[in-house]
Structure formats: C-alpha cells, structure tokens
Amino acid sequence: MTDLTDQSVASAHDTRRRIFAIVGASSGNLVEWFDFYVYSFTALYFAPAFFPSGNTTTQLLNTAGVFAAGFLMRPIGGWFFGRLADKHGRRTAMMISVFMMCGGSLVIAVLPTYAQIGALAPALLLVARLFQGLSVGGEYGTSATYMSEVALKGRRGFFASFQYVTLIGGQLCALLVIVILQQTLSTAELKEWGWRVPFVIGAGAALIALYLRRSLDETTTAATRQRKEAGTLRGLWVHKAAFMTVLGFTAGGSLIFYTFTTYMQKYLVNTAGMQTKTASTVMTAALFLYMVMQPAFGALSDRIGRRRSMLCFGFFATIGTVPLLHALKDVTSPYAAFGLVVLALVIVSFYTSISGLIKAEMFPPEVRALGVGLSYAVANAVFGGSAEYVALWLKSIGVESMFFWYVTVMCAIAGIVSLRMRDPSTEGYLRHEP
C-alpha cells in the first residue's frame, strides 16, 4: 500500500492517483449519506407504521425526533472515528464507518411495525438510527480530512468540494429512489412495504463502497500517527480557538442546510399544501442543481479565499432566509417553489462547498480528523439535527415564523465568526505541509 503524503508538484501519474482517491472516498461518502437521508424522505410513508396515533404533524414530529436522536450520536462518532483516523489512519476509519452504516440500514429494512411488536418497534427504530448516527458522525470528519489532504495544492477548494457533491448526491439518489417508487407503487403499497426498498438498496451499496475503500491510499505518515498527542482531546485542546471557530460557523451552516434540503420537502407538503409527489419532484431538480454548483463554488474559494466565501454565506443567509421561507410558505406554483429553493441553495453553497476543507485547514495532521469530526458533529447535532423537530414543534404551537428568525440569527453568528477569523487557505496548516 502506497501513501499520498508527498504534496510536491504532482506528476501525471500522481494526479491520477489523487483523483482516484477522491473518487474512492466520495463513493463511500455518497452511500453513507444515501442511507442516512433515506430515513427522512421515507418518513411520510412509514410514520403511521411506527407511530400510529395522532395527526400528520404529530407523526412527523415523532419521526423527526428519532431523526434528531441520530444526530445526538454524532459527537461520539466524531470523537471515536476522529481518534481512530488520527492514530490508525484515515482509510481504516472510513472502512469501519461505511460498514456500520450498512448494518443500520439493513436493520431498518427488516424491522417489524408497531402493529406486529408494539412499542418495541419505535424503540428498535431509534436504536438503528443511533447506530447510523454514530457512523455518520465518523464519516464526515474522516472523509473531509482525507479529501482535503489528498487534493492538489492550489485546487483544494475544487477537489474538496466533491465531499458535498457526494453528500448531496446521496441525498439526491435517496430522493430519486423515492420518486421512482412513487411512480410505480400506490400510496398504500408504499406505506405497507415500499418504504423498505430504499433501505435494502442502501445496505447493498454500502458493501460495494466498503470494497472500493479497501484500495485507498493512506494520507498520514507513521510518524504522525505515533505522536503522543495524535487523536487525543488533550492535543486538540491546544487548538481550542480553531475548535470554537468551527463550532460557530457550523451551527448556522448546518441549520440552514437541513432547513432547505431535508426539511424542505415536508415544508412544501405540510405548510405550503403541495402534493407529496410534486414536492419530491421539485426537490429532486433543486438538489441536482445544488450538487453541480459545489465544484464551481469550491473553485471560487481557491481564488477569493475561504474567509471571503464564508462572509458571503453569512451576509446573504442573514438577509435572505426570512423572505425566502415566507415566500415558500405561500407558494402555489411548483416552478416558483423550485426557483426559490435553488436561490436559497446558491446562498448555502458558499458554505457547503468548502465546509470540510475550511475545517481541515485549521488543524495539524495529528489531530485533524478529531478536530474536524468532533467540532462539526457537536454543532451539527445541536443545530442541524434538531432543525426539523424545532420547525415542526413551532408549527404545532402556531408560531412557525419564529423558526425563520431562528435560522437567520444563527447564520448571522456564522457571519460574525467568519469576519473575526483569519483565512485558513492562506495561513492554515494544510498550506504549509509538504
């Protein structure tokens, strides 16, 4: 097994190896997020099977609670897999995380319903989601770190943006599977057994990703992994300023990301009154455009710097969130809904295209996976994972518009944090590595 620790001017062969490494890491990342998002997109169909009592909003609130619970495992996953990646290598950590996601999806695919085993059904659903949350908590930090380290100098923004290309791609593939099932199965069939199909697909795809990741090159040296501070909280605490900065802008970035992606389908159905199939089609098209935007915004960050990209995100998200969500609340045309969602996702792209890279550039290699994974997981668990639950709860008590302002405030905080930080693309650790 070779390694990719030499970041000198790349030969054509070395460039091909690095691109292959990006593809290999991305494939697993896509499968991880496909499996994770399938839950959100199938919730409209399986909610009555696990939470049979109450109205639609109450059932969605219960499923959103389980969705949020999966996020609560992310800090543990970020710590565990970050430590594993820093002490034993990025490749090992990425293989274990995708294997765990496969297991979680398989459990959900065969899980009995409330009618069959009673209260044990939602309890087991929760356990499976916690298992997946642990896996995803490790996936983000290790894959973001790996892709930032393997990317070519001067083009790190472009190459590292493919983490969110595949993250969104996993979300998009999950939605596409739902759209296909909606076109081929009746609503009754989807509620009875059709919702299980995407979980079976996800479990199978995870095994393929596991095979591909076996051939990845390692990006850390043995000397780095053997340092006494490698993968330790003590070693990470030396860089507490970077850790707090990442927490600050990840809170707003994660919140607005989940607002306009996973929650938006439910928002269009439950608030705007759009048909479920129509909302799925709108979101499929919007997510596809969002996915292809990422390399362009990543390349832009290579030219203007990560800090300026983050300042653009903070400014436009702060002034645009409330008007966009109010407009979507009253939208009647699917074309208008599509345009509004895409506009929101353009704003979010300033952050998501460099999300993993900007974090990786702030930490040295011996604690990089831990620093990236844990800081992201904590902020994402508290703010991103709770987005649907908070939105639905505020709607249930009649103050849905308060959620719009909540997102706005958190994005403003992200902008302030970005204003105060130094540009890691010009002063960060990755810039100075060989």
Image (spheres, helix red, strand yellow):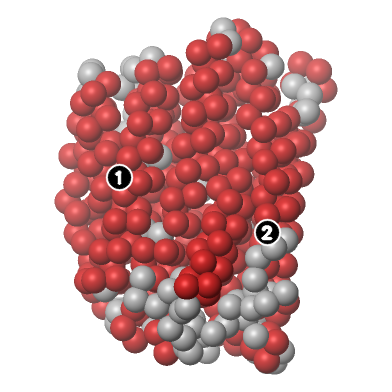
Apparent side of residue 226 relative to residue 351 in the rendered image (left or right): right
Q: How many marks?
A: 2
Q: Residue furthest right?
A: 117
Can you say whether 272 is above or below 348 in the image? above
Q: Which residue is mark 1?
A: 345
Depth check, mark 2 against mark 1: the one in front is 2
Near-viewer residue (346 or 154)? 154
Q: Residues within 10 Å of mark 1 (few under 14, many from 20)?
A: many
Q: x, y (%) of residue 215?
A: 69, 63
Q: Identify whether 7 is placed above or below 392.
A: below
Residue type at numbered disc 1: Leu
Residue 115 lies, with reference to residue 377, above or below; the image says above
Looking at the rendering, in which quadrant would you find the N terminus? bottom right
At horizontal 23% and vertical 19% (from top left) the residue drawn is: 333
The percent position of residue 82, horizontal first and vertical second, equals: 63, 71
**Residue 126 seen by the camera:** no
- Quarter assignment of residue 49: top right
Q: Is residue 93 left or right of residue 295?
A: right
Looking at the image, which is closer to me, 171 or 74? 171
Q: In this orientation, which residue lies closer to the viewer: 396 or 315?
A: 315
Mark toward the start of the polypeptide (2 vs 1): 2
- Percent position (x, y) of residue 270? 39, 22
Residue 213 image label: 2
Tell me: residue 30, above or below residue 218. Answer: above
Identify the secondary structure beneath mark 2. Answer: helix
Q: Residue at x 61, y 52 (%)?
A: 28
